[in-house]
Image (cartoon, rainbow, N blue to C red):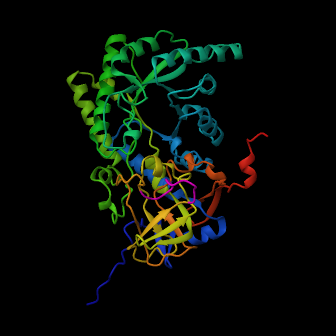
Amino acid sequence: MSSHVVAVGPAWTIPGYLEVASGHLTINGADAVSLVREYGSPLFVFSEPRIRSNVERLKLAAQAVERPIRFFYASKANSNMAVLNTVLQTGIDVEVNSGGELFKALRVGFRPNMIIFNGTSKSNEEIDEAVRAGIYAINVDSIYEIGLIEESVRRVAAERSEPVNPARVALRLVPEIGTRSHLGLQTALLTSKFGISSSEVLDAFRRGLQNPDLIHVCGIHIHVGSQTPDVEPFAEAFRRMWEHLLTIHRETGHTLEHINLGGGFPVNYLRDRSQADQLPEHERDMLGANLEPSVVLREALRVARDSARAAAAEHLLDAVTILLEPGRSVIADAGLVLTTVRNIKRRPETGDVWLLTDAGYNLMLSMNNYKWYYHLISATSAGEPHEDSYKVAGPLCDSGDVYFDIERGGRLPDYRFLPNNVQPGEVLALLNSGAYSLAQMFHYNGRPLPAAVMINEKAVAKLIRRRDTYDDLLTNDVW
């Protein structure tokens, strides 16, 4: 009797997406080393099928709760036009955070009724652009901003010499809910800069209802923060929003159309846990979260329905559309950074081997800001055991440009595990780096920014961002 042994790849692999072939890392069948040879290094690589798969996962979660739910992709996570176009083709909507992101969303083809505008410090020009476009909702961050939007509607009506439709607004609340994510990613605390506090909610709604010819209050909004590993903050946020909606209806008779629960669905950055024990426990729990969107939606609706039943107001809850603003969960694991080892050095005093790459924190700002963990592998020798320890650093003239926690806070591993005898010229890959990397990169040290490619289901690479030239460094300089 013969036995059939199924080969199991490294823990970071994702069948059909991230795999090993002929010893190299492949992305939807495209060879990573060949991509660097063709497009240069460093290089951003995105997977069109993975983006589509991530959106489909969200849609299946919505089907599981049998409720009207609209997803608005948080374009701040990655607003590359090809990424936006892929999201548009999946049939979901978009959330923007600036006039620039609004411009890009409209240019790529999102209709105005598919767009939400967030932000704490919108300029008059940005508000005017949103009002002119007639977008689905402007999420208002303060009572003061209500007046700014009213003034904008008057300005736009004056420039057109005719009345315009009232601007649709939702009030962003800060519910005082903590999570187990980084403090810098928590947005529902009174110590954060976002939203209207609970003590001002009713005043905000009364103010918003004063001039219905200028603004229409259509919803309320909460965002507990990014990479939230537990279901409880989502459920508590939804319960509090529902109770605010109920109070507003009783006090004013006004019925809201939607409750916006924001984003925050986590991504598992620790699919490969070979270095997980080198991270603090709370970091492991956050970075390795496996919270399913369907679990979040079911629990949030259960809590709200219990409250609605107790208040004999289930009819109001049933009439509300739920909005969500996923960003990280759509794009993070659909992108990676390929970087080449350019230099190697040894410290006889410490026994350390240093690998110096061409990808610094100017491409992955979160690794510096939040000591964010991106799993590092060899794309050149992807199938080899990753068991040797290396100090890894980027090319910037900055001591903080390292792949470990230079402050010795233990928030990143001191060493990275890679194959034996890594040499200059080898290609490495930082996985799960599709969110808040390309969108935040900058020209530190006069370094031209890298190209980006998108891989389709046929393993064909398409250039979606050209590599900068030195001339691009001069584009906006005047002398």
Give the residue furthest to the right: 479
Question: Quick one: quadrant of the N terminus?
Answer: bottom left
Give the overall secondary structure of the magenta segment: loop
Residue at point 56% right, 59% down? 359
Q: Nearer the viewer, residue 1 or 368?
A: 368
| Residue 381 position (above or below residue 181) | below
Question: Quick one: quadrant of the C terminus?
Answer: top right
Res 153 seen here: yes
| Residue 90 position (above or below residue 350) | above
Res 16 seen here: no
Give the residue furthest to the front: 349
**Is residue 399 covered in magenta?**
yes
Give the residue furthest to the top: 210
Give how far across and how far down residue 424 sits, in percent: 56, 73
Give how far across and how far down residue 248 sits, in percent: 35, 16
Residue at point 28% right, 26% down? 314
30 left or right of 316 in image: right
State the image quarter where residue 476 is shown.
top right
Region rendered in magenta: 395-404
Residue at point 23% right, 27% down? 307
| Residue 253 position (above or below residue 323) | above
| Residue 396 position (above or below residue 100) | below
Residue at point 51% right, 71% down? 345
**Is residue 306 covered in magenta?**
no
Give how far across and how far down residue 457 sits, in percent: 54, 63
State the image quarter where residue 42 is shown.
bottom right
